[in-house]
Amino acid sequence: MGKPALLYYRLLNWQPENQALAAAGFTVHELDNPEQDNDEILAGIEACCAPLGFYFGSEKMARCPNLRAIISNTTGVPHIDMAAAAARGIEVFSLKDEQAFLDTITPTAEHAWGLLLALLRRTPWSFDHVKAGHWNRFEWGAPAMLSRLKLGIIGYGRLGRRLARYGAAFDMAVRYHDPFVEADGLSERVGSLVDLVAWADVISLHVPALPETQGLISAEVIDRFKPGSLFINTARAELVDEAALLRALQSGHIAGYGADVLDGEFDLDFKAAEHPLVRHAQSHDNVLLTPHIAGSTQDAWRETQGRVIELAIDYFKDLKT
């Protein structure tokens, strides 16, 4: 028997060593993105990649009569119809339940902390000041030391707990809101989301994108943020009412927003320059945005991509035995 057929999408940009790993275990067919899917290719594949931003539902599964595995190097799978996959006997290989492995993957938490520091100390804008030939420290005083500020964490899973450790290392008072996680002695649990945002000077969001978490940070919640607080989002944009957030930034109710995500970013025709938060950031220094790079270190890419590829390769090997 030959190697199983895998459909890989070039927009995933797997590291060269992971493309070689996939080629060793599969006969790889390539398309730029799922919009190029056609029945001829789908009919022949036994494994298929599932990029974020493209829903892998029952309709697509029905076009893949030989499909045995879906591969996605993501920690969540909101873009995959898991019930439909289970009903068809299709295995899904993602990082969702790879907790021991994920405990070794730290860049998203590190980036969240970097956004917090840069936003608080206004580092990008003070650098612009220097590049323009100026050298005046008195324009750039931060509002407070981190050790005098309160850190509120929404979502106390792997990333939230790591942020709590960072906050404690910087002598911050730390509390969190997560109805599914008991207190661990590192930080205090707050039962109400609005009570947490009213208490904290800095809020960091670490909640998975699920149907029940859509719009979690609603206009009503944003209204309850502590005046002058900072908000960090390295989770997903759809968790936040961005229109209400923008109004809070314009009024100064929220002093700053640091984010690695924007609504609509996974659309193929997404134009960052037209996004309201980007337009605001072009003329204000209270929004700091990065292009979904929180998990983007070479070693993290290599290890997370390789992990799901290896899981899928082992699965097909087991089918042959």
Image (tube, rainbow, N blue to C red):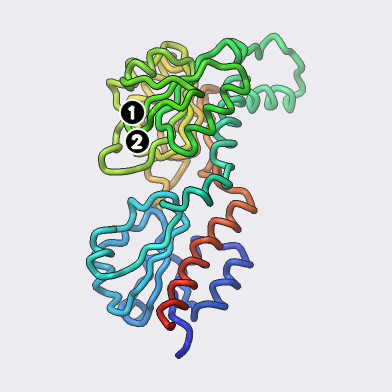
Viewer-proximal residue, 102 or 154? 102
Q: Earlier in the sequence, mark 2 or mark 1?
A: 1
Q: Which residue is mark 1?
A: 217
Residue 47 vertical placement versus 108 (above, below): below
**Disc 1 on helix, strand or loop?**
loop
Q: Position of residue 57 (x, y in %)?
A: 27, 62
Count of picture labels: 2
Q: Position of residue 148 (x, y in %)?
A: 58, 10
Q: Which residue is mark 2?
A: 239
Amino acid type, callout 2: Leu
Q: Position of residue 59 (x, y in %)?
A: 23, 67
Can residue 278 be seen from the camera position used here? Answer: no
User: Which residue is at 36% across, 29% downward?
Assistant: 178
User: Which residue is at 52% across, 27% downward?
Assistant: 164
Residue 141 vertical placement versus 104 (above, below): above
Tell me which corner region of the image, top left, top right, bottom left or bottom right, holds residue 162. top right
Amino acid type, callout 1: Ile
Q: What residue occupies the far bottom of the structure in this picture?
A: 1
Residue 88 vertical placement versus 262 (above, below): below
Q: What label does residue 261 carry, if any?
A: none
Tell me the distance, in whole angstroms, between the alpha carbons under discs 2 and 1.
Answer: 6 Å
Q: How dense is the environment of label 2, judged by Cα within 10 Å: few (below 14), some, or many (20 and up)? A: many
Can residue 61 be seen from the camera position used here? Answer: yes
Tell me which corner region of the image, top left, top right, bottom left or bottom right, holds residue 141. top right
Q: Position of residue 19 (x, y in %)?
A: 57, 70
Left or right: 117 as drawn, with respect to 312: right
Left or right: 180 as drawn, with respect to 271: left
**Disc 2 on helix, strand or loop?**
helix
Quadrant where the C terminus sits is bottom left
User: Which residue is at 31% across, 20% downward?
Assistant: 192
